[in-house]
Image: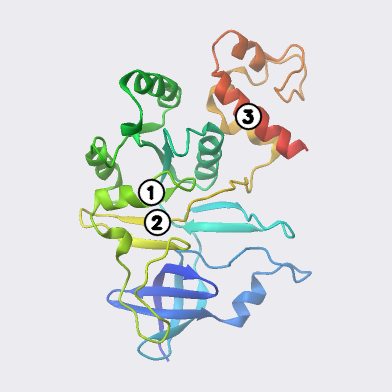
Amino acid sequence: MNKIQGRVIRARSGFYDVRRDNLTLRCTLRGRIKREQRSELGRRIFADPVAVGDEVIFTQLDDEEGVIEELLPRRTKFSRQYPGKREVVEQVVVANADRVIVIISTRLPDLNFRFLDRFLILAENGGMDVVVCVNKMDLIDSEEGERVTSLFSTYRLLGYEVIYTSTVESPGVCELRRVMEGKFNVLVGASGVGKSSLLNAIQPGISLRVGEVGRKSEKGRHTTTLVELFPLDFGGEAADTPGIREVGLWGIETENLDRYFPELEPYLGNCQYNDCSHLSEPGCAVTEAVDAGEISPVRHRSYVTLRAERDG
């Protein structure tokens, strides 16, 4: 049987839809690979060793099914700590993406800067560019809109591109298309922020389209419980992800957490104590900068919360 290189476009419960040109097969994973992706003690390293976006070598078994023989090295990855309580393992949500579009809503659910900052850290740690998309602008009045844009000016000053969108009144949708064009994008956010609605606004019907696959495994049904990769008519691709309820940091050393808050960098090394954690120690240059209005207190609270979680 010939071995073929393809890309995973959908993953669920040990089955992976792998595409090469116009061929899409429902594949399983060779047992050898499953064993290789475990620790020396036989424990899981990943929640699932294969992720949407992975380049793989697979063998075609028939017109509908195949088996993955090899996982190729990843260029980037968007990972979090798997929310399961019994094992501390990595969940690779999407592999080899160029850009993370972090979607956050003004209402229903309310703005959540803690979630946003966690997503930004995971994207940077995984080697991807980030765009912040503030959705549901139609749910707030002009006065509240000015307050929201003022809050996000902090992120613009840090170098993040911020886009304001509404699928009802359509502002910002064209701008979102612009930043997504020609890129492999992954859309992430909490449940209810409007990822699917934005996808439909960008390209009508995208959230209902699935690849052509055979009859053996009940193909053709869209679900929001899995990650799925779609081509975009205007160029590029979008990976739709389920709403994320927990954003556990993965691959971030506690002592290096401050490096993921660029506004802290000018003050690092200027504290009274060399091992300063920048929480509440005397002589901390960071907290003094917060008090002086030089660092956003909202961002510093995010840092304090994350540091406390990891120290706890």
Q: Which of marks 2 and 3 is in front?
A: 2
Image quadrant in which the C terminus is located: top right
Q: Earlier in the sequence, mark 2 or mark 1?
A: 1
Q: Are marks 1 and 3 in contact (CB under 8 Å)?
A: no
Q: Residue 240 carries which label?
A: 2
Query: Which residue lies at the image location 62% right of the left edge and 80% below the top edge?
Result: 32
Q: Which of marks 2 and 3 is nearer the N terminus?
A: 2
Confirm whether residue 174 shows in the render.
yes
Horizontal placement of 36 versus 52: left or right?
Answer: right
Image quarter of residue 125: top right
Q: Which amino acid does label 2 sit on?
A: Asp
Q: Are marks 2 and 1 in contact (CB under 8 Å)?
A: yes
Disc 3: CA contacts within 10 A as few (<14), some (14-19) or many (>=20): many
Q: Which mark is residue 195?
A: 1
Horizontal placement of 295 versus 25: left or right?
Answer: right
Taking depth in this image into account, of 165 and 71 the one nearest to the observer is 165
Q: In the structure shown, which secondary structural element does the residue marked by tag 2 occupy?
A: strand
Q: Which amino acid does label 3 sit on?
A: Tyr
Q: In the structure shown, which secondary structural element does the residue marked by tag 3 occupy?
A: helix
Residue 16 vertical position relative to residue 101 in the rendered view, above or below: below
Q: Residue 151 carries which label?
A: none
Q: What residue type is labelled 1?
A: Lys
Residue 108 pos. (x, y %): 44, 39
Query: Which residue lies at the image location 53% right of the left edge and 35% below the top edge?
Result: 117
Q: How far apart are marks 1 and 3 (CA)?
A: 26 Å
Q: Which of marks 1 and 3 is nearer the N terminus?
A: 1
Residue 268 vertical position relative to residue 71 in the rendered view, above or below: above
Residue 208 pos. (x, y %): 31, 63
Residue 304 vertical position relative to residue 80 in the rendered view, above or below: above
